[in-house]
């Protein structure tokens, strides 16, 4: 019995071993057959190549085109002293070819490590940096337009380092060192034509890639990345088309041959958006008679409420902060404000209004004494008095409290330093210069604290600016309210003039604005005028014949916009507002520690809120389209005008759709040739070139002859 049992166990084990060996054999044959099938795949001609289609001229040489869209192509060949590093909304810099150091962002020292070489194996030295930054850019021997701002930089040679001195301190001076370095040993004493013609055909570059000019497609280029580490692609091709119609025709016929383009032409491509460095700005003409400071403030409040298309703009108000929901003014209320302000501005010039205000300054004496009781109902007070200096609001308390604060229109609480614990009273001065009262309705939340609790009281003050009288709304009877009821607002004949240059982005922006204004019956208070001629728009701006200019500022890599507030050039600063103090604080903000930045930001906001010369609406978005075979978007959301650093190309992943030639697969002779060819090199067979029938026959003939 035991012998039979032992034989049974042995049979089971043998059966298990047999099945295991058969399974291994099947797996191996499946693997071999799959490998054979892959070798019979039709060659698409696109293996390991990323192809971008464009209808813009491809400029791969630095300083031949100032467009930011060409930075990627130039960066694939040349390196700068420092590279920009993007971390969401922040921009930093890291050393590339050079070591750049500075203590004050005005004076910089630059050295070049010894390990860098050019593609012709010549060493890259400090002489190349000096040649590029001093001869090409500062002296501008090639008359490059983009080099004009660099003429006032001082560059000195100090042994093995260069000393750069800029006219003023600014963190944006670092941007200068993002300019690409050119080979001095090739281009010294050469003119611009040599650079763009002879050198362009035989580029000596500093990066790991190499340039191949396409012989078939005029204007197209191929960047060979084979010698670059960790890249999933070997070639980056930029395929140029003379116009969008030609591009569309090609993509329609060969969608699988294009991976990236900026035109929406095929369903095989997925739409993506990136945030550029172009910031859309509304400049308020501060010298306009009707565009008073209050109107500018209300208009800025209105523009912040408009829901712009998320595919065209992302809201970004720079250093001037976001607005909370509590600070937003209802469109219905804004309509009343515009109706009164614009019609009154039409009846009386701003100069006359200011003269009348000055004449009434001496009559600003009456006080309003408000006694606060616990759990009291809110109080509404109408001040029909022009407040140009101060209007004291006296506050008395019936109970004992430790301190009193006031928050105007939901802003931060202001502690009343005048609070007297003996009389339990305090004085809160109202004045436009304090920015704690504005035309029309103001809300004041008075909060008084005990040791363990706090109570709140709301005062609503409507500031009209008519006669010097203070009256209590609660004492008015119904008849008075009926008599004082306002008539329905009628469209104004004196709207705010808004001008802009008509391009695709502005068309979408203004469309969002006008839609919102029409929905809330505010469109009659704005008149939009567009220009298709930039010179004509510049003439309009130079004449100051507008109230608002919608304009795009190219931040590029800049953080410091202080120059915007000291320029009197209308084309740069259409607001006509200048402030040395505001410019200095902005400049210092980006060079300071986080603790000091908090203090400076308060000062910046104070200067800004006192004048409201402009409003940064947000950064533009642009669309690009990726082939759906690419499994994940390799590019970051913020790329700053397509500075797609070549490191991002390491993230590219796509599906390879292999086209199998089944006629070749079921050809037994091909399969026999495959087995014979791979008999001794099976592990490496996918990396070997598999001969076709003609090649195999020729080799057999050669062997027989031998």
Image (tube, grey):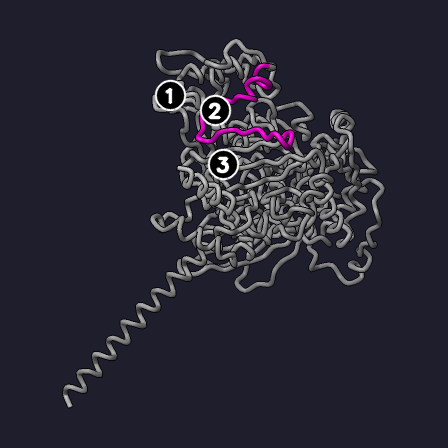
Q: Residues within 10 Å of mark 2 (few under 14, many from 20)?
A: many
Q: Secondary structure at mark 1?
A: loop
Q: Secondary structure at mark 3?
A: loop
Q: CA distance from mark 3 to mark 1?
A: 22 Å
Confirm whether residue 519 shows in the render.
yes
Please name the residue that numbered disc 1 is placed on.
Answer: 112
Q: CA distance from mark 2 to mark 1?
A: 16 Å
x 53%, y 48%: residue: 633
Q: Quadrant of the C terminus?
A: top left
x 59%, y 49%: residue: 627
Question: Is 520 located above or below residue 645 in the figure?
Answer: below
Q: Are marks 2 and 3 in contact (CB under 8 Å)?
A: no
Question: Is 540 located above or below residue 483 in the figure?
Answer: above
Please name the residue that numbered disc 3 is placed on.
Answer: 645
Give coordinates of residue 275: x percent, y percent. 58, 42
Give coordinates of residue 25: x percent, y percent. 35, 64
Which quadrant would residue 251 be assigned to in this image? Answer: top right
Relative to the observer, which residue lies in front, 677 or 613?
Answer: 677
**Sequence-earlier tag: 2 or 1:** 1
Please name the residue that numbered disc 2 is placed on.
Answer: 205
Nearer the observer, disc 2 or disc 3?
2
Q: As drawn, which residue projects farthest toward the bottom?
A: 1
Nearer the observer, disc 2 or disc 1?
2
Question: Is 590 located above or below residue 415 in the figure?
Answer: above
Confirm whether residue 582 shows in the render.
no
Say if the magenta span includes residue 387. no
Q: Residues within 10 Å of mark 3 (few under 14, many from 20)?
A: some
Relative to the observer, which residue lies in front, 433 or 192?
Answer: 192
x 53%, y 37%: residue: 236
Read off the magenta span. Answer: 194-219
x 52%, y 44%: residue: 694
């Amino acid at each position: 019995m035991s012998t039979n049992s032992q034989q049974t166990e042995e049979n089971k084990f043998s059966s298990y071993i047999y099945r295991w060996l058969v399974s291994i054999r099947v797996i191996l044959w499946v693997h071999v057959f799959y490998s054979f099938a892959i070798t019979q795949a039709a060659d698409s001609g696109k293996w390991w190549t990323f192809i971008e289609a464009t209808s813009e001229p491809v400029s791969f040489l630095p300083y031949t085109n100032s467009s930011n869209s060409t930075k990627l192509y130039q960066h694939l060949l040349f390196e700068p002293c420092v590279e920009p590093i993007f971390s969401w909304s922040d921009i930093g810099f890291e050393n590339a070819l050079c070591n750049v150091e500075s203590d004050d962002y005005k004076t910089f020292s630059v050295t070049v490590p010894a390990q860098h070489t050019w593609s012709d194996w010549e060493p890259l030295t400090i002489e190349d940096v000096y040649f590029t930054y001093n001869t090409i850019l500062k002296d501008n021997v090639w008359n490059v337009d983009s080099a004009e701002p660099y003429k006032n930089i001082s560059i000195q040679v100090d042994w093995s380092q260069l000393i750069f001195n800029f006219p003023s301190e600014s963190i944006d001076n670092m941007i200068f060192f993002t300019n690409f370095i050119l080979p001095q040993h090739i281009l010294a004493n050469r003119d611009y034509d040599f650079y763009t013609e002879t050198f362009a055909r035989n580029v000596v570059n500093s990066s790991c890639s190499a340039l191949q000019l396409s012989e078939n497609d005029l204007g197209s280029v191929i960047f060979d990345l084979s010698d670059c580490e960790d890249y999933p692609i070997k070639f980056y091709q930029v395929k140029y088309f003379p116009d969008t119609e030609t591009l569309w025709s090609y993509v329609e016929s060969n969608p699988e041959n294009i991976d990236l383009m900026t035109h929406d032409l095929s369903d095989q491509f997925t739409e993506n958006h990136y945030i550029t460095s172009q910031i859309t700005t509304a400049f308020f003409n501060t010298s306009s008679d009707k565009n008073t400071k209050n109107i500018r403030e209300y208009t800025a409040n209105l523009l912040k409420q408009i829901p712009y298309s998320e595919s065209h703009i992302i809201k970004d108000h720079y250093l001037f902060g976001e607005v909370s929901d509590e600070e937003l003014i209802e469109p219905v209320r804004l309509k009343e404000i515009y109706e009164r302000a614009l019609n009154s501005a039409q009846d009386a010039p701003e100069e006359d209004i200011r003269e009348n205000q000055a004449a009434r300054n001496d009559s600003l004496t009456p006080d309003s004494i408000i006694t606060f009781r616990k759990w009291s109902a809110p109080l509404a007070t109408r001040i029909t008095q022009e407040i140009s200096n101060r209007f004291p609001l006296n506050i008395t308390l019936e109970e004992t409290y430790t301190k009193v604060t006031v928050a105007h229109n939901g802003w931060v609480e202001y502690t009343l330093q005048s609070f007297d614990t003996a009389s339990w009273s305090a004085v809160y001065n109202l004045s436009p210069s304090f920015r704690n009262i504005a035309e029309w309705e103001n809300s004041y939340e008075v909060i008084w604290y005990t040791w363990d609790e706090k109570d709140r009281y709301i005062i609503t003050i409507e500031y009209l600016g008519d006669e010097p009288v203070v009256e209590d709304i609660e004492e008015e009877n119904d008849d008075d309210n009926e008599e004082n009821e306002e008539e329905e607002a009628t469209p104004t004949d004196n709207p705010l003039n808004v001008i802009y240059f008509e391009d695709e982005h502005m068309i979408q922006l203004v469309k969002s604005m006008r839609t919102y204004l029409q929905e809330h019956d505010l469109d009659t208070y704005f008149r939009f005028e567009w220009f298709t001629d930039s010179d004509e728009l510049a003439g309009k701006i130079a004449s100051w014949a507008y109230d608002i200019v919608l304009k795009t500022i190219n931040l590029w890599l800049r953080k410091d916009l202080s120059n915007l507030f000291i320029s009197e050039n209308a084309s740069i600063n259409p607001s006509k507002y200048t402030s040395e103090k505001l410019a200095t604080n902005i400049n210092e903000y980006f060079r300071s520690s986080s603790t000091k930045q908090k203090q400076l930001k308060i000062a910046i906001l104070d200067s800004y809120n006192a004048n409201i010369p402009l409003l940064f609406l947000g950064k533009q978005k642009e669309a690009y389209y990726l082939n759906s075979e690419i499994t994940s978007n390799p590019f970051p959301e913020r790329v700053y005008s397509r500075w797609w650093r070549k490191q991002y190309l390491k993230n590219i992943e796509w599906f390879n759709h292999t086209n199998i030639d089944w006629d070749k697969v079921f050809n037994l002779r091909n399969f026999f040739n495959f087995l014979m060819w791979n008999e001794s090199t099976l592990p490496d067979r996918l990396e070997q070139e598999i001969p076709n029938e003609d090649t195999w026959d020729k080799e057999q003939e050669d062997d027989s002859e031998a």
